[in-house]
Amino acid sequence: MNFRFDLTFPEDTAFSCGIVLSEKQDFLDFHNKIMEIMNFDTSLMASFFILDELGNRIKEISLVDLSFADEDHNTYVMENTSISKIVEKNNFKHFQYVFDMYSDKYFDINYKGEYKGQKFRVYPASLGVLGNIPKQTNIEDDFDFNHTSKNAKTTREEDDFLDEFGDSCDSRRSNYDSSDEDFENGNFEDINNYLDKL
């Protein structure tokens, strides 16, 4: 038996994708196929979430085991969670696949039932993609640890300001410095001289 899933993207209603998996496959196979189709960065974390009828996330299917011995096991692990167990035995039909943890971008996934269309040589199989594939957040664009990020624009603007006004600022600073030197050497008038005149 093969299962059909349809993926949609809430931020772009024109996007859709169909994927077929066999009953022997697990959520890691599902994850890898999504990564392949979308050409996503496989080094980034991702998770499936099982939804209840109201659309609330009730169970996570994570890429790695996030549970600890002293905690209640509230997550499944992709490679240990079969597709048939979730959609047939537990009767879950609605999921989310978070492909961008940084900005919580996700696909809505709906189980469409048994797939009886064309036979594929290899599963999972793609039924095609409509619309534009969403992009993952490129962390390097926002946080460039080599000082070449978008924040460098601010640094360049500061440099331009100093190039334009730096000389005048330096001259003013030198005036203040000379006043400070006079103060340190005692070269200032005594206020008592003024009090005598009042």
Image (spheres, rainbow, N blue to C red):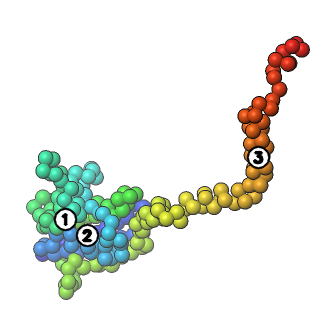
Judged by depth in the image, the label closer to the viewer, 3 or 1, is 3
List the residue tagged with mark 2.
31
Residue 104 % position (x, y): 37, 57
Element type at marker 1? helix
Front-most of residues 165 and 89: 165
Element type at marker 2? helix
Q: Amino acid at mark 3?
A: Ser
Pointer 2 or 3: first along the chain: 2
List the residue tagged with mark 1.
78
Count of picture labels:
3
State which quadrant residue 179 falls in: top right
Tag shown at residue 3:
none
Residue 124 % position (x, y): 22, 77
Query: Would residue 86 appear left or right of 157 to someone viewing this image?
Result: left
Tell me if residue 97 comes above or below residue 195 in the rendering. below
Alpha carbons under labels 2 and 3: distance apart? 64 Å
Residue 94 at least partly seen? no
State which quadrant residue 1 falls in: bottom left
Q: Quadrant of the C terminus?
A: top right
Tell me if residue 161 comes above or below residue 123 in the rendering. above
Judged by depth in the image, the label closer to the viewer, 2 or 3, is 3
List the residue tagged with mark 3.
174
- Residue sitting at 63 percent across and 61 percent down? 156
Query: Would residue 13 appear left or right of 172 to someone viewing this image?
Result: left
Element type at marker 3? helix
- Residue sitting at 81 percent across and 21 percent down? 191
- Residue sitting at 23 percent across and 64 percent down? 63
The reply to whether dot 2 and dot 1 touch (C-beta < 8 Å) is yes
Alpha carbons under labels 3 and 1: distance apart? 67 Å
Q: Amino acid at mark 1?
A: Met
Tell me if residue 165 comes above or below residue 16 in the rendering. above
